[in-house]
Amino acid sequence: MAGLFSRYLVLALCLIICLTSISSANAAVRRFKWEVKYEYKSQDCVRKLALTINGKTPGPTIRAVRGDTIVVKLNNSLLTENIGTPWADGTEGVTQCPILAGDTFTYKFVVDRAGTYMYHAHYGMQREAGLYGSLRVALPDGESEPFSYDYDRSIILNDWYHKSAFEQAAGLSSPQFQWYLCNSTTLAKDDVCNATSPECARHVIIFVPGKTYRLRIGSLTALSALSFEIEGHNMTVVEADGHYVDPFVVKNLFIYSGETYSVIVKADQDPSRNYWAVSKIVGRESNTTSGLAVINYYPNPRRDPPTIPPTGPKWNDTDARRNFSLSIKSHPKFIQSPPQTSDRVIVLLNTQNEINGIRRWSVNNVSFNLPHTPYLIALKERLGHFDQTPPPDGYDTAKYDIFKVQDNANATSSNAIYRLKFDTVVDLILQNAQTMNKNKNDSETHPWHLHGHDFWVLGYGKGKFNKSSDPQNYNLVNPIMKNTVPVHPFGWTALRFRANNPGTWAFHCHIESHFYMGMGIVLEEGIEKVGKLPSSIMGCGDSKGYRRP
Ligand SMILES: *[C@@H]1O[C@H](CO)[C@@H](O)[C@H](O)[C@H]1NC(C)=O
Ligand SMILES: *[C@@H]1O[C@H](CO)[C@@H](O)[C@H](O)[C@H]1NC(C)=O
Ligand SMILES: *[C@@H]1O[C@H](CO)[C@@H](O)[C@H](O)[C@H]1NC(C)=O
Ligand SMILES: *[C@@H]1O[C@H](CO)[C@@H](O)[C@H](O)[C@H]1NC(C)=O
Ligand SMILES: *[C@@H]1O[C@H](CO)[C@@H](O)[C@H](O)[C@H]1NC(C)=O
Ligand SMILES: *[C@@H]1O[C@H](CO)[C@@H](O)[C@H](O)[C@H]1NC(C)=O
Ligand SMILES: *[C@@H]1O[C@H](CO)[C@@H](O)[C@H](O)[C@H]1NC(C)=O
Ligand SMILES: *[C@@H]1O[C@H](CO)[C@@H](O)[C@H](O)[C@H]1NC(C)=O
Ligand SMILES: *[C@@H]1O[C@H](CO)[C@@H](O)[C@H](O)[C@H]1NC(C)=O
Ligand SMILES: *[C@@H]1O[C@H](CO)[C@@H](O)[C@H](O)[C@H]1NC(C)=O
Ligand SMILES: *[C@@H]1O[C@H](CO)[C@@H](O)[C@H](O)[C@H]1NC(C)=O
Ligand SMILES: [Cu+2]
């Protein structure tokens, strides 16, 4: 099982990577040198082995201007782990092979859109071990965003575990920020509690009274859905996954793993005191204490606020979270109109299953597993094999009761992929259902992330998706475009995209353990249009040692 010490590491860049570079007169090339290694860190006063970039977790923030070329030279100093390349924004096993430990690899890509993005490890649980950071892309001079602010701050929300990644249930220590916790019952054997470590100090965000702040908030949690709030302050949501949002005001920002948002907050409250920023786990019942940070009104001392931190929304207030999802619409000046009809509708039933007595996740009763040879190489170079039977475009809607534990929880395992006709319009409908938990109504929130595309978010609904009536309520006027969306408990989410980016693209639950337990699919479109593959992405499965003749 892939744990903290698994052999491979794959770094993915969760952003739109432009393969055909944009020509821009003032585009710059920004170069970074990163060294990745394991180091002991005490994020929450508990010493734990973490993955770092240049000694830090989160890693360095990349700042760029739209059109720039980013070149990151990565030195893999991990003794036992390999690092892969996000060639074409891909996933290990889908588009490329990992790179050997001890090697240096150079990532090169053009950032083609302004906004807030993240990069993170994409293999095993390395993302959770700390290998991630943020990327801010500014507009070129002379262009302005549809909102204004005085200062800009990045916050990546994460959950931090004391035990190894797969012991999640037991070891989750805090959903974000630093938290003073030195409790021997929750510590793993090698952890050392160190309350004097400077890393253990509470995270502080300074607010200058009267100023306006843009908080760029991203979530890379391994498991948790979060509610983020700032005591006594409202937030205006203005950006989602790099797209401008028709502004709306919230008290709580609901954020799922893989998503990014920008919110505007005014430092307009009583300046004589400090306030709490709170990140609370929602979507699943949890005893984990909320993550806390201090909003420090300048020039007050950095001390904790005088109040009890807000308790946040109820963990199971699904209506509030669906309402939040429905509130996210495109900014009127930046609408990219969706196609009004689609050529193919793929309904994806999300279920918990078993195969040979082992717990899995499945889509339409198929639990996904990766082939030894990445699909892109298998299809392009005719190396390696995968199941050629097309996976189902739906499930038996008449017979399957999404509110009940299924009669036969056994699923099929497959590495088959969806082949799409190039340039067609495809709808993906995520359908949630009851888990295998027989004791209560239980349906988890799954944040689904699509590689290679942004999609239009056409709707969210309660219960079972109705193919004839629900599409009548789609938002075809000003839907937001995103690359990650939740499917809420016992609900559905409808997405549309145009299959016009040649390649093989993963669509998967961004909860790492769910993906590795089968919760994903792979789409192929226009494979014949993909150019010559670089030999640097070969080196595993049947492509090992292969050089194109
Ligand atoms: C990678 O980093 C290590 C440790 O700093 C150094 O010894 C090594 O020379 C670096 N390798 C490359 C290829 O830069
Ligand atoms: C330590 O954790 C256990 C189990 O969660 C809890 O019962 C106990 O009260 C905690 N002790 C302290 C000092 O926080
Ligand atoms: C605790 O942290 C302090 C400050 O970083 C450091 O000097 C000390 O060695 C640490 N102690 C342990 C036991 O790790
Ligand atoms: C936040 O918004 C709510 C609802 O619009 C409003 O009632 C409240 O006064 C606002 N609070 C602040 C601090 O602006
Ligand atoms: C929370 O703690 C209580 C008391 O220790 C326990 O009964 C309950 O099962 C815990 N809930 C979860 C979701 O861990
Ligand atoms: C939410 O969970 C609580 C227990 O934590 C339960 O009492 C309540 O009925 C639940 N609410 C809904 C809407 O399911
Ligand atoms: C969600 O939105 C609906 C429709 O606007 C409203 O009736 C309901 O009260 C909202 N629920 C919550 C929890 O915000
Ligand atoms: C499900 O799989 C288990 C383990 O392979 C097997 O024992 C059981 O008979 C299967 N159940 C059904 C209904 O097929
Ligand atoms: C899922 O696949 C298994 C194995 O082929 C089969 O036994 C089961 O009936 C299927 N379940 C559904 C809901 O299609
Ligand atoms: C579970 O959901 C069903 C259908 O929505 C409902 O009838 C039932 O009362 C719920 N059971 C519990 C224990 O909440
Ligand atoms: C879907 O909606 C239509 C129109 O409201 C209705 O007639 C039909 O029975 C629904 N289908 C299902 C399976 O619920
Ligand atoms: Cu999931």
Image (tube, rainbow, N blue to C red):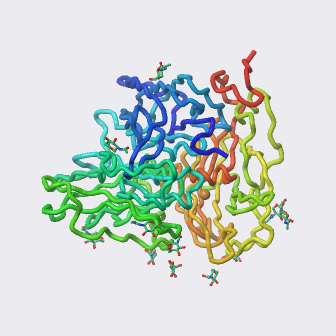
Observer able to see residue 239:
no
- Above-or-below relation of 202 to 470: above
Identified at 71% across, 35% down, the residue is 374
| Residue 212: image location, x then y, percent | 22, 53
- Above-or-below relation of 348 to 99: below
Give the left or right position of residue 362, taking residue 200 as reference. right
Rendered-image quarter of ligand 7: bottom left
Observer able to see residue 115:
yes
Quadrant where the C terminus is found in the figure: top right
Q: As drawn, which residue projects farthest toward the top?
A: 549
Q: Nearer the viewer, residue 390 or 447?
A: 447
| Residue 407: image location, x then y, percent | 79, 72
Give the left or right position of residue 401, taking residue 184 as reference. right
- Above-or-below relation of 119 to 531: below
Identified at 24% across, 69% down, the residue is 307
| Residue 414: image location, x then y, percent | 78, 49
Identified at 47% across, 51% down, the residue is 259
Give the left or right position of residue 110, taking residue 467 as reference. left
Q: Nearer the viewer, residue 375 or 173?
A: 173
| Residue 95: image location, x then y, percent | 65, 34
Give the left or right position of residue 254, taking residue 412 as reference. left
